Image: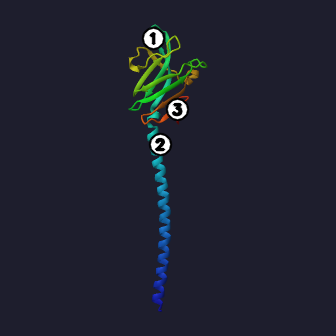
């Protein structure tokens, strides 16, 4: 064997080892990229699932009639483009403490709605916000800001959601 053949064999062996190391690093990089893409896809799927649920809001309102008398109720906003179903809203008096009767609605279409509490401590009918001929003020401060305690509903895909204290959204 001459020196040229030995050198060529050594060079071939080193090249083979280098190729094996490069393949191993490439495999690790591919696994990491796959993990990152899987996480991104899972986040995107969760965002799509939550999209409609995040667009339903319910807050307490004070409505002043033309004779300056006040009524209290709820402003319900479905900002998505599809209805929500089987809605149960739990709330308490704007002054705090005493619970209102639960408000159960079969469906809330997209849009903004007002529902007022009548004098007999019962909920009235769901009205389109723009059709209510009263001055409407959202109750956002003090005890009134915590008037809505829970909103449970099903989205268009029949997933059940609950929004607690007007902010915290949980599935189930």
* Residue found at the very far top of the displayed protein: 67
- Label 1 to label 3: alpha-carbon separation: 32 Å
- Label 1 to label 2: alpha-carbon separation: 43 Å
Provide the residue designation for mark 1.
Answer: 65
The numbered disc on residue 26 is: none
The numbered disc on residue 46 is: 2
> Going 47% across and 47% down the picture, which residue do you hit?
42
- Label 3 to label 2: alpha-carbon separation: 16 Å
The numbered disc on residue 162 is: 3
Q: Between 70 and 93, which is closer to the camera in this rendering?
A: 93
Q: Is residue 147 left or right of residue 66?
A: right
Labels 1 and 3 touching (C-beta < 8 A): no
Labels 1 and 2 touching (C-beta < 8 A): no
Labels 3 and 2 touching (C-beta < 8 A): no
> Going 49% across and 34% down the picture, which residue do you hit?
160
> Going 50% across and 67% down the picture, which residue do you hit?
24
Residue 16 percent coordinates (x, y) = 47, 76
Residue 2 percent coordinates (x, y) = 47, 92
The secondary element bearing badge 2 is classed as helix
The quadrant in which residue 131 appears is top left
Badge 3: few (under 14), some or many (20 or more) residues near its Cα, within 10 Å?
many
Q: Nearer the viewer, mark 1 or mark 3?
A: 3
Ranked by sequence position, the earlier of labels 1 and 3 is: 1
> Going 44% across and 25% down the picture, which residue do you hit?
106
Q: Between 131 and 126, which is closer to the camera in this rendering?
A: 126
The secondary element bearing badge 3 is classed as strand
Total number of numbered labels?
3
Ranked by sequence position, the earlier of labels 3 and 2 is: 2
């Amino acid at each position: 064997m001459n020196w040229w053949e030995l050198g060529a064999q050594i060079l071939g062996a080193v090249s083979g080892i280098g190729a094996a190391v490069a393949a191993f690093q490439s495999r690790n990089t591919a696994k990491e990229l796959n993990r990152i893409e899987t996480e991104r896809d899972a986040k995107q799927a969760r965002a799509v699932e939550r999209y409609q649920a995040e667009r339903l809001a319910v807050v307490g309102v004070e409505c002043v009639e033309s004779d300056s008398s006040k009524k209290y109720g709820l402003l319900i906003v479905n900002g998505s483009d599809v209805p929500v179903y089987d809605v149960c809203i739990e709330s308490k008096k704007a002054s705090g403490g005493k619970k209102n009767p639960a408000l159960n609605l079969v469906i809330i279409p997209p849009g903004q709605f007002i529902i007022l509490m009548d004098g007999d401590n019962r909920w009235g009918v769901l009205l389109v916000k723009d059709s209510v001929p009263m001055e409407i003020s959202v109750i956002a401060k003090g005890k009134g800001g915590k008037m809505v305690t829970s909103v449970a509903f099903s989205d268009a895909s029949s997933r059940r959601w609950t929004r607690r204290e007007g902010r915290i959204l949980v599935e189930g």
